[in-house]
Image (tube, grey):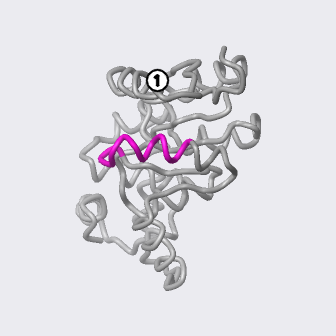
Amino acid sequence: MKLDSVRIFLVDDHPLVREWLAQLLRGEPGFEVIGQAEDATGALAAMRQNQPDIAIVDLTLRSGTGLDLIKDLRSQLPAVQVIVLSMHEELAQVERALRAGAAGYVMKRESTTRIVEAIRTVRSGNVYANPEVLARLAERMVGRRRTTGSVDALSDRELEVFRRMGEGHVTKRIATDLGVSMKTVQEYQARIKEKLGLADAAELMRAAVRWTEGVL
């Protein structure tokens, strides 16, 4: 271990992404990648043992969710600072990640320099996100009106189910990915319909697809 190096742990369900990220960070002076995991359970156990400074976490994992992991880290390993690296650009996801305890949010489509910049920013005690995203998030928070028909009314787990539906995942797969029963997913779907004022399953699916595409 290098003296005073930033100890980094990677959490992503795609091995190629983890390896690409590890190679990128190992090339940066003062960074040390100390471990990797593909799911929330394995990540939490490994981080308890290795005590990283920074965890770079994807929101979509093989089992569990990135949001759940962020909350667990905040309560169990509060010294670990979390940066989300995600393909999801919805402002609701960014806001919920930051609210859950993440100190940074970087989108996978952004340049690799953003990841390095995020780590250095977070380690200095500041919150990091793309300036454009921060501006849009500020507008959203200033102008928000929480109503029954808004996705803001959904819980974190309901929003996760809604997002996965919009990506085309069937109920069985959502249940498997989240580690819950199909009945539980169906209960989430029923609550989502009620909160969004949707009449039936078809309307729910259309709304999920539109939201994922950034239309809703």
Residue 110 at x, y percent in the picture: 33, 49
Write down the residue under mark 1: 38
Q: Taking 188 as reference, is 167 left or right?
A: left
Residue 71 at x, y percent in the picture: 66, 44
Which amino acid, mark 1? Glu
Residue 109 at x, y percent in the picture: 29, 47
Q: Taking 148 as reference, is 79 left or right?
A: right
Judge by depth and name the residue closer to the eye, 50 or 178.
50
Q: Residue at x 35, y 25 (%)?
A: 20
Q: Main secondary structure of the magenta part?
A: helix
Q: Quadrant of residue 214?
A: bottom left
Q: Is residue 136 above or below residue 130?
A: below
Q: Residue at x 34, y 34 (%)?
A: 173
Judge by depth and name the residue closer to the eye, 2 or 87.
2
Judge by depth and name the residue closer to the eye, 119 or 206.
119
Q: Assess whether residue 8 is covered by the magenta stretch.
A: no
Q: Quadrant of residue 80?
A: top right
Q: Secondary structure at mark 1?
A: loop
Q: Residue at x 44, y 65 (%)?
A: 131
Residue range of the region highlighted in magenta in the rendering: 108-119
Q: Is residue 23 above or below residue 177?
A: above
Q: Assess whether residue 115 is covered by the magenta stretch.
A: yes
Q: Residue at x 57, y 22 (%)?
A: 32
Residue 6 at x, y percent in the picture: 64, 30
